[in-house]
Amino acid sequence: MITVHHLENSRSQRVLWLLEELGLPYTVKRYERDPKTMLAPPELRSVHPLGKSPVLVDRDPSGASRILVETGAIVEHLVDKADGRLGKPYGDDAAMRYRQFLHYAEGSLMPPLLINLVLGRIPMVGKTAQKRLQPMIDVHLDFVERELGARPWFAGDTFTAADIMMSFPLEAARDRGFLSVGKPITNIWLDTIQARPAYQAALEQGGPYRFA
Ligand SMILES: N[C@@H](CCC(=O)N[C@@H](CS)C(=O)NCC(=O)O)C(=O)O
């Protein structure tokens, strides 16, 4: 049995979405952010020492349970559990892009967006830091726009878990206004994923999600 420890308005929404796409049974334990700091509540630390979300607990029929953090690792674990569905597609090029975007989402695209958000909240330094970060963010978002212009999904012709991984950084980028000029293809891609029935079902399971 799978339990997802899910923080509202967070990256872990992707895990719920993937579970819905795969049709795997699961339960959700929801957590609310501290309204002042926006951090996760301390209870999440009793589930995992990092105190971040998502945390996946996977209990097998013998009662043994395994605990896993890091969205990309959780996504790979769930794809394996579903016999590879939504995983690596056929064809060397598509398979390579699948692997690349699975890691690119958290490894390269998310960090400048997060630094921008965190520094932006600091009076005095915020504005200067954001100015420096903007060109870095633009390089990524231009790359994404070109990639999505070349094929319908991040890996190729089929929807994969790489698209699910890429959803959160792009939703966060749109939320901060970074997609408002010159990014029509990325905007259409976001509208398309958000219209998927499994995406909508995951929203019902996860509660507040300001990026949809
Ligand atoms: N790279 C990690 C990041 C985990 C992470 O930072 N999660 C955020 C959710 S957006 C969190 O729990 N933030 C609350 C906090 O730091 O207290 C992953 O993708 O799982």
Image (tube, rainbow, N blue to C red):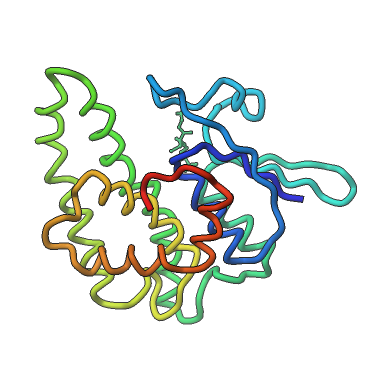
Residue 187 percent coordinates (x, y)? 25, 63
Farthest-out residue, right? 62
Who's the residue at 16% across and 25% down the image? 126
Q: Nearer the viewer, residue 195 or 124?
A: 195
Residue 149 percent coordinates (x, y)? 23, 74
In this picture, is 52 found above or below 34?
Answer: below
Side (left or right) of 153 relative to 161: left
Q: Nearer the viewer, residue 195 or 132?
A: 195
Side (left or right) of 164 relative to 205: left
Who's the residue at 49% across and 38% down the image? 8
Q: Nearer the viewer, residue 170 or 205?
A: 205
Residue 76 percent coordinates (x, y)? 58, 57
Asked which quadrant contains residue 186, the reply is bottom left
Who's the residue at 68% across and 69% down the image? 83
Asked which quadrant contains residue 157, the reply is bottom left
In this picture, is 129 found above or below 25?
Answer: above
Who's the residue at 21% across and 28% down the image? 120
In this picture, is 135 found above or below 84?
Answer: above
Residue 74 percent coordinates (x, y)? 58, 50
Number of labelled discs?
0
In this picture, is 45 found above or below 139?
Answer: above
